[in-house]
Amino acid sequence: MPSYTFDHVHLYSPDPQQTAEFYEKKLGAKRIGVTEIVPGRFITKLDLHGVTLLISKSKENMPAGLVHFGIKTDKLEKSIAELKTGGVKFTQEATQINPSLKISFLQAPDNVAIELQEGGV
């Protein structure tokens, strides 16, 4: 059976720098860095006392705020197959984002989006 661990909370913001500064100055988060995950798309990564926050620029016509939370697995394809067999709906199939990160998205109850990932940013 694949293993699962909590990985991150992902936020969209019209101004990721300003949002990151809020978490740093008001809540004591530490900036880990900024990563270009695909050409032109950057993610600011913060450590909020052991919880990873990812902040990226809001997409056009998409609301800012909480986008999804991420769960890491050691066997993405096997996880997808098992979850689908159990009736879980996926909104995005496995996608290789970069050489070290592969993701998919599933729909949890109450319209909660979960990024299921193998590897990391």
Image (tube, rainbow, N blue to C red):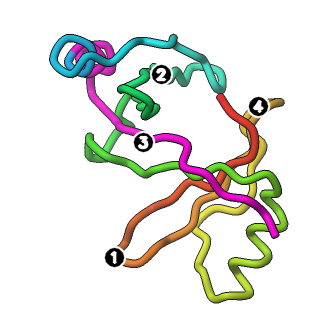
Residue 4 falls inside the magenta stretch: yes
- The N terminus is located in which quarter? bottom right
Q: Alpha-carbon distance for marks 3 and 4?
A: 19 Å
Which amino acid is tagged 1? Asp
Residue 112: image location, x then y, percent: 39, 66
Q: Earlier in the sequence, mark 3 or mark 2?
A: 3
Residue identifier under label 4: 98
Q: In which image quadrant can residue 86 be found?
A: bottom right
Residue 34: image location, x then y, percent: 51, 13
| Numbered badge on residue 9 | 3
- Residue range highlighted in magenta: 1-21
Tell me if I can see residue 56 in this picture. Answer: no
Q: Which of marks 1 and 4 is nearer the N terminus?
A: 4
Secondary element at image label 2: strand
Q: Alpha-carbon distance for marks 3 and 2?
A: 10 Å
Which amino acid is tagged 4? Asn
Which amino acid is tagged 3? Val
Q: Residue, x 78% and y 63% (percent of image)?
A: 2
Secondary element at image label 3: strand
Residue identifier under label 1: 110
Callout 2 crowding tier (Cα within 10 Å): few <14, some 14–19, many ≥20: many
Secondary element at image label 1: helix
| Numbered badge on residue 45 | 2
